[in-house]
Amino acid sequence: MSSVRSFEVGDVGAVADLFQRLLRKTGEPASEDLKAYLRSLFLDFTAGEPDIRSRVHVRADGSISGFIGVLPVEMEFEGRRVRAANCGTFACDDRDSDPFAGARLLRDVLSGPQDLSFTETSNDVSTDMWRSMRATILAPYSLEWLRILRPASFALEAAAGRLSALRLLGPLARGADAIVCRRGEKQAWSHYTPLAGKADALVDAPATDEEFASLCRQFVRQYALHPVWDQPVMETMLRHVARKALHGERVQHVVKTRTGKAIGLYLYYGKTGGIGRTVQVMAEPGQEAIVIDCLMRNAHARGLCAIRGRTQPTLLQAMMGKKCAFLHASSTIVHSRNPDLLAAMTNGRAFLNGLAGEGWTRLIGDRFG
């Protein structure tokens, strides 16, 4: 009879194979680098919370058929500590022979001792499972925003995802963008033009891990429900963030006034001609729009064709008028038996996604091997 139990060292190889086959969609064997990272992330990094653990689904013959990666997160809600389970990597085999294996795996995780459970990477299949457990989808946290900066290069990059040889047409696309982007002095849906504004009065500069971690801990306190990161843990997370080879160069900046007061920060990845991926934008209340302007200016100056990221309620209003498109790729979902915690999350008073989710790990955006 199949069963569910905690993830152990001896399961690393089997889980790595599931990750390769079901999530990376490749028949290549799992590398030692991937195996070492899964052990480091889901066993070593989480050792301080032994009762909030990743889970595996085990067939009757003892082989592994499913996995949910769980990262314990210490949070604070209105002055009191809260234990949370960040449920990220979810892979389950045997959908035909054992269609309820995934549901049993998720149910076991949600029945743990944590005050709340959440995920930011739920696809349609996983979302149905979470819904069956009476979880709540947080729509304002579940959208991707996209700002096109250079239209011809963006169209080429999107098409090259299916046929990489098209990137040879890059010089033609850049020429077309040079013509299109000269038109008018107003922002347009089709392209981005850096215009004079309040951002000109700010200093937008690279930040060290130490400075960035300290500011993240400062800005996150404005939320009623937020992670409690100590400095060493935050800096460890940023060392993970440093390696995302598939997404391009890391850009980790802080935005300050001329007097040196930090009002915001952003972290994204990108390369010339590509689509940048934003992991985090944070700002002092009321300064979100200016920090977003700085992010878009920086992405444009680096030659990106577009920049994208995940929404948060505090950023949505600031993005109005910035010609961003919004789409749904995956859902942020929460489960809690505490009505006050649920209210904080459904009302947009919680800090989720990005550094509070799975976006900081190498599993999203890095190569292994």
Image (cartoon, rainbow, N blue to C red):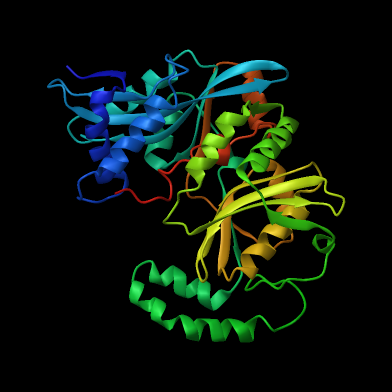
The residue under the point 67% across, 58% down is 295
The residue under the point 70% across, 56% down is 205
Q: Give above or below for 275 relative to 70.
A: below
Q: Give above or below for 152 relative to 206.
A: below
The residue under the point 59% across, 35% down is 352
* Any part of residue 260 in sight: yes
Q: Among all residues in the image, which is located at the extreme left? A: 61
Across and down, in percent, residue 308 comes to: 57, 57
Could you say which is closer to the camera, residue 321 or residue 254?
A: 254
The N terminus sits in image quarter: top left
Relative placement, left or right, of 122 versus 97 is right
The residue under the point 77% across, 78% down is 185
Q: Quadrant of residue 219?
A: top right
Q: Among all residues in the image, which is located at the extreme right? A: 259
* Any part of residue 100 in sight: no
Could you say which is closer to the camera, residue 280 or residue 314?
A: 280
Numbered label tally: 0
Across and down, in percent, residue 149 comes to: 61, 70
Q: Quadrant of residue 108?
A: top left
Across and down, in percent, residue 207 comes to: 66, 49
Across and down, in percent, residue 107 comes to: 38, 21
Could you say which is closer to the camera, residue 349 or residue 207?
A: 207
Relative placement, left or right, of 35 versus 276 is left
